[in-house]
Image: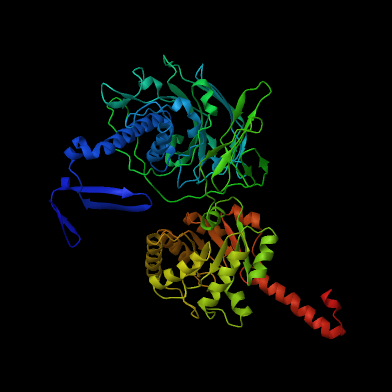
Amino acid sequence: MPFLEGITFTGKLADLSAYRMRGFDKIIVRRKGGPKPEHIHKGENFANVRRTMSEFGGCSRMGRHVRLALLQLRHLSDYNFGSDINSLMRQVQLQDGTGDWGKRNIILSDHARILEGFPMNETNPTFDSVIRNPIYYTMDRATRTAQLDIPELKRSINYFPQNNHAMFRIVVTLGIVPDMAFNIQKKEYLPPAWYSAKFYSREVSTEWYPSLEGMPATTLTIATDALPPDDQWTLMLSVGVEYGAFRENGKIKEVARYGAAKILALRGRNGSDNDDLPNEGIHDSDEAPAKEPIEPDLPEEPAVAAHEEKSYQAPEVTYVYTTKEKNVDKVDVRAYTYTTKDNKKSGCSHFYNSNATFAFSFACILVYETKTTHPMSAFETFRQLHQNEKPLVLGNAWDVHSARLFEQSGYAAVGTSSHAVAQVLGYDDGENVSFDDLLRLARRTAEVVKIPVTVDLEAGYARTADGIVENIKKLHDVGVAGINLEDTLPNTAALRPAEEFQKQLSAIINKMAQQNIKLFINTRTDGFILGLETALEETTTRARLYEQTGVHGLFVPCMIEEKDIRAVTSTTKLPVSVMCLPTLPAFDALGAWGLKRISMGPFAYRYVNKQAEAAMKDVLSVNSFKPFF
């Protein structure tokens, strides 16, 4: 048997178990323990365990058949959603009132609605956040056909790509999912005898279109020729956005793990696509599923690799809709269903609200629970604002009221100006304001405004990575979305050595990841503000080094010339920002040069104070308060 020596296991690998836990990115290794396999398989005390394992095995096998019905979209997923599908199949299995425990069947064709709208993305933006427009469809189970009417897609209007890939297209799959029944003779869960590879998904797609532009309205028709001999099956329609990149000779290569896809609709037998089975959302089962059975005749599914977290901005409206069962008063509109004049139902996905949510059709007034969605975090929203074609114009506030004014004026985000905040409190700039005072201002600002708040942390209010991360965590905990962190120390006129600051940034990013702190790190480099003769060379060198650390943005104050801006934005993939100056060009020009963010610095504060000072002098000059009115 293996045993633990310090942090080292000694023994045979066969005596160790390795596994992952949801929400934890490390691999857990432990000694195998508990009952012996022969006791579990034959012991009287484990009869209930065997029944449960049998049913979980059936759900796992059924989940595999669901995934085969959207096989061509699997590479658009960013996580292994198999366990989530299995959990939904478990809900279907529990509806079987005819089978004995351990042998209950999984009749998806009677409860097809449960999978509608299932998202295949967890960290990437979902399909409904990339394509923010209903995709109308019709399905005919008898002919095993479907038609999708894809609207005209325009970037930043109803199409929001998640990355900078050059091309995109819409991919649709149509497949047949068989019901799963327990075979008494073979003592295992099996699909119908007729099920084979010819019933797996079929694929159709649009042409490739430039991501910067969008695509025209398109209609896609898809069909599967295979006809099952009975009615123990469900027709499943899925849709995805696939990105492409140019390779040699102008060929377009599909980009894996960066798409978005979902199960759009299903049609079961006897109109069961409208069943009223509650879908309580995707969740872990009370007991771990049994290991998925191996089926040699089924193709291997591609492995899923996790990658950098992406964000999306979900549209939100207020809509009051009352049914006999529920009142839905705040809904996130992802899509809707409707009934045509000839009484044929069409539609796309569901309505969601932030609690246990409800989806419904305007005409049919169908109400059923569906998967709860989660709004974007402040970090995700703020990060997304740096991905638009037009630069983000950041309102730099000096107190809570000025932050509120920026929000009311239509600004998408607000940041503190260290110079302005210091002057309001009677200090000079340069970390002279205490961190506690800065934290109080950040907390109250984040409480009052609904837009993302970023804080000028100057050099971090600490000199070690641990100290800086401690301060970052405090800001994160009060709702701050991002910070600025500069590569000069307070009250100095010299840049820190580039490699030294790069190492500190790497340590900060790593420690933030270990503590699950998600905050936008905008790194400020001061070559231009210090007036260095080699400012451009110094900035491009540091941009490359800082990008390697995993920071999210680069801030270059006092850079105003087109040639300099283009040189820096072409050097790094980080979104680059500059600061307000009298000679700074118009926003459209800055956006065309590749800039993603423009800050005000202390200049809004100075302007307001200049106006106030003039009015104060006028009061004494005219011996009246009329200058105030």
Tell me, yes or no, if residue 291 can be seen here. no
What residue is shown at x 69% (from left), y 61% (from top)?
A: 408
**How many marks on residues?**
0
Q: Position of residue 201 (x, y in %)?
A: 43, 25
Q: How is the image coloured?
A: rainbow
Residue 243 lies, with reference to residue 175, above or below; the image says below
What residue is shown at x 39% (from left), y 68% (from top)?
A: 504
The residue most toward the top is: 229
Residue 84 lies, with reference to residue 11, above or below; the image says above
What residue is shown at x 62% (from left), y 31% (from top)?
A: 217
Q: Position of residue 87 (x, y in %)?
A: 40, 38
Q: Position of residue 406 (x, y in %)?
A: 67, 63
What residue is shown at x 26% (from left), y 21% (from top)?
A: 185
Give residue 154's quadrant in the image.
Answer: top right
Tell me, yes or no, if residue 404 can be seen here. yes
Front-most of residues 382 and 49: 49
Q: Position of residue 8 (x, y in %)?
A: 18, 58
- State the quadrant of the C terminus: bottom right
Residue 164 lies, with reference to residue 511, above or below; the image says above
Give residue 209's quadrant in the image.
Answer: top right
Front-most of residues 406 and 342: 342
Give residue 437's quadrant in the image.
Answer: bottom right
The residue most toward the front is: 44
Residue 566 lies, with reference to residue 263, above or below; the image says below
